[in-house]
C-alpha cells in the first residue's frame, strides 16, 4: 500500500527530462517524513532560483491512517504539500567550471 508519492514539478525555464531522481526515506514520525532526493542531473535543478522559476517537490499523501496534520487529525485523502527545491549547484562558480571541463 503506497502511503505517499513524491514528484518534482519543473520550474518555468526547465525541461522535464532533467528531473529524474530517486529517493530514500531517512526518517519519519506520524507528523513528518524526511526523505533524501538523489537527482540524476543536479546541475539542472532550480537553476533559476526565484520561487516562480525553481523546481518544486510535491508529495501526495493518499487516504490512509499513517500521517496526521499538526492538529492530530488524519490527513484527508489525496492531500498534497509542496516545497521549493533550492539550487543543487552553485551558479557562476566552481560547479560551472567543473561541468565545462567534463565535456
Image (cartoon, rainbow, N blue to C red):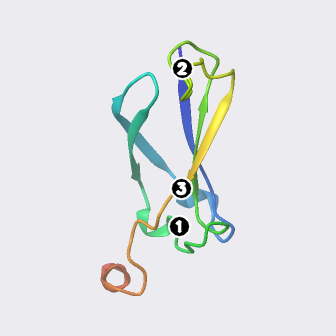
Residue at the spot 54% in from the left edge and 22% down from the top edge: 68
Query: From what the image shows, is residue 61 above or below residue 92?
Result: above
Query: Which of the two discs, 3 and 1, sits closer to the camera?
Result: 1
75 or 9, which is in the foreground?
75
Residue at the spot 55% in from the left edge and 32% down from the top edge: 5
Where is mark 3, residue-wise?
A: 19
> Marks 1 and 2: CB-CB under 8 Å?
no
Disc 1, SS: loop
Residue at the spot 65% in from the left edge and 36% down from the top edge: 80
73 or 64, which is in the foreground?
73
Residue 48 in percent (x, y) is at 57, 74
Residue 60 in percent (x, y) is at 61, 33
Which residue is most to the front?
71
What label sits on residue 46 in the rendered view? 1
* Side of 37 where 48 appears, left or right: right
What label sits on residue 72 in the rendered view? 2
Residue at the spot 36% in from the left edge and 79% down from the top edge: 99
Amino acid at each position: 500500500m503506497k502511503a505517499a508519492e513524491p514528484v518534482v514539478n519543473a520550474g518555468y525555464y526547465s525541461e522535464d527530462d532533467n528531473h529524474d531522481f530517486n529517493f530514500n526515506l531517512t526518517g519519519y514520525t506520524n507528523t513528518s517524513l524526511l526523505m533524501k532526493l538523489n537527482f540524476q542531473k543536479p546541475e539542472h535543478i532550480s537553476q533559476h532560483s526565484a520561487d516562480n522559476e525553481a523546481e518544486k517537490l510535491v508529495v501526495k499523501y493518499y487516504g490512509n491512517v499513517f500521517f496526521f496534520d499538526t492538529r492530530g487529525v488524519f490527513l484527508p485523502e489525496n492531500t498534497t504539500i509542496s516545497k521549493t527545491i533550492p539550487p543543487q549547484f552553485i551558479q557562476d562558480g566552481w560547479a560551472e567550471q567543473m561541468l565545462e571541463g567534463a565535456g
